[in-house]
Image (tube, rainbow, N blue to C red):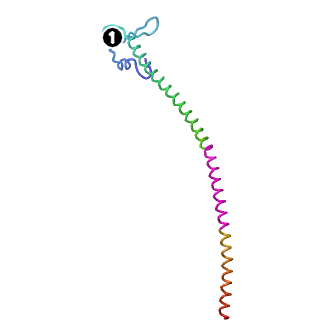
Amino acid sequence: MKKSGFTNSEIMNELGIKYQIKKSKHLGMTCYNIKKGNGVIVLDEILKQILSELQKVNSRLDGLEKGQRELITEVADLKLRQVQIKDNLINGLGPYFEQIEKHIDTKTEEIKNASEDQQLIIDTLAARSVKHESEIKDFKRILKNQ
């Protein structure tokens, strides 16, 4: 009789049980009598050990399922935080860039005004320079004629 790829004798050897198995027919069914060396039936012991192992496996599975639920919750929370951070970043940077734009516009206007003022001064100085050169030429001509 095979279960999960192991024979009964392999399972019992694994559990460390000394046993005797006698196969018999009873009311048309095949029966197995499992006895310890002293004649006590060990089937209850085997079932208790199997049940104990199954309970351990169930406990471990419960732990894994709980951990999986926690991971799912954490991933959902991280996705929500990611969206919030993205929204905060976009909403926070909008006004910041507007302030930068206003600052640049203000500074550009100041530079433009200063440049116009400087150009006016340069034009005035250029006109004076031409006037002074003309006067110097006139003085030179007068001095030469004297």
* Residue behind mark 1: 36
Quadrant (top left, top right, bottom left, bottom right) of the N terminus: top left
| In the depicted structure, whether residue 110 falls above or below residue 64 | below
Viewer-proximal residue, 100 or 65? 100
Residue at (48, 26) in percent of width and height = 64
Viewer-proximal residue, 20 or 38? 38
Quadrant (top left, top right, bottom left, bottom right) of the C terminus: bottom right
Residue at (43, 23) in percent of width and height = 5
Q: Is residue 109 covered in magenta?
A: yes
- Where residue 131 sits, quadrant-wise, is bottom right
- Where residue 121 sits, quadrant-wise, is bottom right
Q: Position of residue 81 (x, y in %)?
A: 57, 36
- Where residue 35 sits, quadrant-wise, is top left
Is residue 122 rendered to the left or right of residue 21?
Answer: right
Magenta range is 90-117
Q: Where is residue 50 in the image (x, y as percent from the top left)?
A: 41, 17
The residue type indicated by label 1 comes to Lys
Q: Is residue 64 covered in magenta?
A: no
Q: How many labels does the image show?
A: 1
Residue at (44, 18) in percent of width and height = 55
| In the depicted structure, whether residue 141 falls above or below residue 25 | below
Q: Residues within 10 Å of mark 1 (few under 14, many from 20)?
A: some
Residue sitting farthest toward the top = 27
Quick one: SS at disc 1? loop
Residue at (38, 19) in percent of width and height = 11
Is residue 40 rendered to the left or right of residue 2?
Answer: left
Residue sitting farthest toward the left = 38
Viewer-proximal residue, 27 or 38? 38
Q: Position of residue 142 (x, y in %)?
A: 67, 91
Tell me the chief SS of the magenta region.
helix
| In the depicted structure, whether residue 51 falls above or below residue 108 | above
Q: Where is residue 135 in the image (x, y as percent from the top left)?
A: 68, 84
